[in-house]
Structures are given as structure tokens and as C-alpha cells.
């Protein structure tokens, strides 16, 4: 009887784990479908429908969906974050996050755009640009971004899903003014999650 109960428990846990894995994978698949569709809606988009087949992603992996400790910073001054076109954009450092990923401790900074903070639609938006050891190999050499929300902070924690990491427009075409990830967000690990390299030659934006 005890042996049967043990087998049933193992089967239950196996089914539950596979159900969770499938559900999470479906969630990421849906997120990426919406992500691709946004390129077709955006008037300033570097990609057209035929280009979407050249977008590639790592398989969904829930181990890269982490719950980080967050410390909201106070009295931070506005600073200019360099962009890939040689100009800059104004940001403030909003918070520090700490987490463990692949057995290593990591710390990153979340930023808030000064320009977007005045827009009611984006007033809660937090910006997480980063680089890691996959850059120039499997992912865009200039790093990737993740969008978060200050409303998602609960009990001094925030969910950060690297499966939702995406490329800046300058990964696909020149002529775009996108921030360069600050050195303090250079991770000394490979983030094998989110968007990969664009697989065709970079475009030239028409002026």
C-alpha cells in the first residue's frame, strides 16, 4: 500500500510539473506572438511582416524567471545615458535588484525614463538594460532590454523574466536612438533566455 501511494505521489508531481512547464511555455509563446505583432503596428518599426521570420528566441525556460529582492533608491539625480547614435537620454536610477541565477549572485539597476515618466501611459514603466556573456555570440552585441513596472513590486520583491528580454531597434537597423546598457548591468554569466541575434544583415533606416 505504501509503495502504491509513493508511486501515485511521484506521478502526481510529474504531471503537475509538466503541466506547469507547458503552461509557462504557452505563456511565453503568447508573449512573443504579441511582441512580433507590435512591430507591424508601430509606424516607426524597423521590421515588416516578411522580416519576422528572422526573429529568433531561446526556448522558454522558467529558471530564468526569477524573483529578485529590490531596494528602491531615493534622491537620485537625473543623468544622461548614452545611446547608440552618439546622443543621450535622461534617466534616473530607480532601484537596485539582487538575485541568484545559475548559482551566482547578481545585482542590477532599474532605471526610469524622464521623458516617459510624464506620460500617463508609461509613468510606472521601469527600464532594465543589460549585457551578458552571450553577447556577440548568440545574442545582440549591444545587449538587451526588459520592461518592468513599479506596480509589480510586492514585499520588496519584483519578478524579472529574462525570457522576455528583447533587442533594441538598433539590432535590426541603423538610425535609431536607443540607450547603451550601463556597465553596472553587465552580468558575468550567460543569459540563455529571451531574444537571440537577428539573422540577416542590419538595415539602413530611410531618413
Image (cartoon, rainbow, N blue to C red):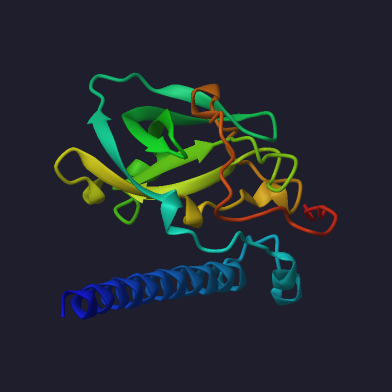
Q: Where in the figure is residue 114, as x and y percent of width and height?
A: 39, 35
Q: Residue furthest right?
A: 201
Does 113 appear above or below 29? above
- Residue beneath the point at 42% across and 29% down: 106
Classify residue 86 by image quadrant.
Answer: top right
Left or right of residue 128: residue 180: right
Does 57 appear above or below 193? below
Residue 164 versus residue 43: which sits nearer the camera? Answer: 164
Badge count: 0
Residue 124 in sight from this viewpoint: yes
Does 136 appear above or below 151? above
Classify residue 16 by image quadrant.
Answer: bottom left
Q: Where in the figure is residue 55, as x and y percent of width and height?
A: 69, 64
Classify residue 19 by image quadrant.
Answer: bottom left
- Residue beneath the point at 17% across and 46% down: 154
Q: Where in the figure is residue 70, as x and y percent of width and height?
A: 26, 34
- Residue beneath the point at 46% across and 30% down: 90
Amino acid at each position: 500500500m505504501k509503495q502504491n501511494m509513493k508511486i501515485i505521489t511521484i506521478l502526481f508531481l510529474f504531471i503537475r510539473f509538466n503541466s506547469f512547464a507547458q503552461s509557462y511555455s504557452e505563456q511565453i509563446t503568447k508573449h512573443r506572438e504579441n511582441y512580433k505583432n507590435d512591430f507591424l503596428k508601430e509606424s516607426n518599426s524597423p521590421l515588416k511582416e516578411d522580416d519576422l521570420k528572422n526573429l529568433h528566441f531561446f526556448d522558454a525556460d522558467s529558471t530564468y524567471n526569477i524573483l529578485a529582492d529590490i531596494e528602491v533608491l531615493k534622491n537620485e539625480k537625473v543623468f544622461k545615458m548614452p545611446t547608440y547614435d552618439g546622443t543621450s537620454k535622461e534617466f534616473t536610477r530607480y532601484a537596485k535588484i539582487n538575485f541568484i541565477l545559475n548559482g551566482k549572485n547578481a545585482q542590477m539597476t532599474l532605471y526610469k525614463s524622464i521623458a516617459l515618466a510624464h506620460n500617463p501611459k508609461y509613468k510606472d514603466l521601469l527600464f532594465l538594460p543589460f549585457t551578458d556573456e552571450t553577447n556577440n555570440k548568440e545574442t545582440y552585441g549591444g545587449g538587451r532590454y526588459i520592461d518592468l513596472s513599479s506596480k509589480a513590486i510586492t514585499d520588496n520583491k519584483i519578478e524579472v523574466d529574462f525570457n522576455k528580454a528583447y533587442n533594441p531597434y538598433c539590432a535590426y537597423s541603423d538610425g535609431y536612438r536607443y540607450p547603451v546598457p550601463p556597465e553596472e548591468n553587465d552580468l558575468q554569466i550567460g543569459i540563455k533566455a529571451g531574444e537571440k541575434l537577428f539573422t540577416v544583415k542590419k538595415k539602413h533606416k530611410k531618413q
